[in-house]
Image (cartoon, rainbow, N blue to C red):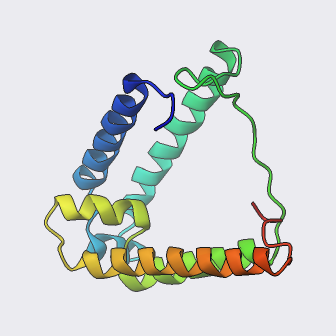
Amino acid sequence: MSDRSLAFYASILVGGLIFGFGLGYSHMARPEVVLNFLQFDDLGLLFVMGGAAVVSGATMTVASRLSDRRAPLTGASYTRRLKELDRNVVVGGTVFGVGWGLSGICPGAAYASLGVGNWPILWAIGGMFIGAYLQGRWRSRRADAGTDATTAD
């Protein structure tokens, strides 16, 4: 157990509940709605995502200026994480996109869709866990073999 406070974990729980409620309320936790969006049949989710991007961008801008560039609960600095466009980014993005298209839902919304009774999504969540496990094993084997497996981290 780390030295993080109960308030830190409580804020994560509350934030996750608010996020999940928002996904359920906006119907982003329903694969059929997301698939209609991806097929350009219903562009309503574009406004949901756009609104979330505006709120997130404004919050990060204001929070980074008001709090001396420190996160309120952890004290960690707000910094940009720049990442090179390398093979790992392209392959990871492709796998993420294909998985999103096949299941009709992104990983975050998949968990929220359990809250709206979408039990078949457990297959997709199981696939995410298996994929993450296999990718972790692959990277650890590359690291054991001396290959530079962590350059994209």
Left or right, residue 122 beside residue 94: left
Query: Horizontal and vertical percent for residue 113?
Result: 25, 64
Q: Residue furthest left?
A: 117
Query: Horizontal and vertical percent for residue 63?
Result: 60, 22
Q: Residue at x 75, y 47 (%)?
A: 81
Query: Horizontal and vertical percent for residue 117?
Result: 13, 66
Q: Can residue 104 be seen in this view?
A: no
Q: Residue at x 43, y 68 (%)?
A: 106
Query: Horizontal and vertical percent for residue 96?
Result: 55, 75
Q: Which residue is drawn at 69% across and 31% down?
A: 78
Left or right, residue 9 beside residue 149: left
**Closer to the camera, 44 or 69?**
69
Residue 35 vs 26, above or below: the answer is below
Residue 120 lies in what quarter of the image? bottom left
Left or right, residue 55 beside residue 146: left
Q: How many marks?
A: 0
Residue 149 vs 60, above or below: the answer is below
Residue 17 vs 98, above or below: the answer is above
Q: Residue at x 71, y 81 (%)?
A: 141
Q: Is residue 65 visible?
A: yes
Residue 59 lies in what quarter of the image? top right
Q: In which quarter of the image is the C terminus?
A: bottom right
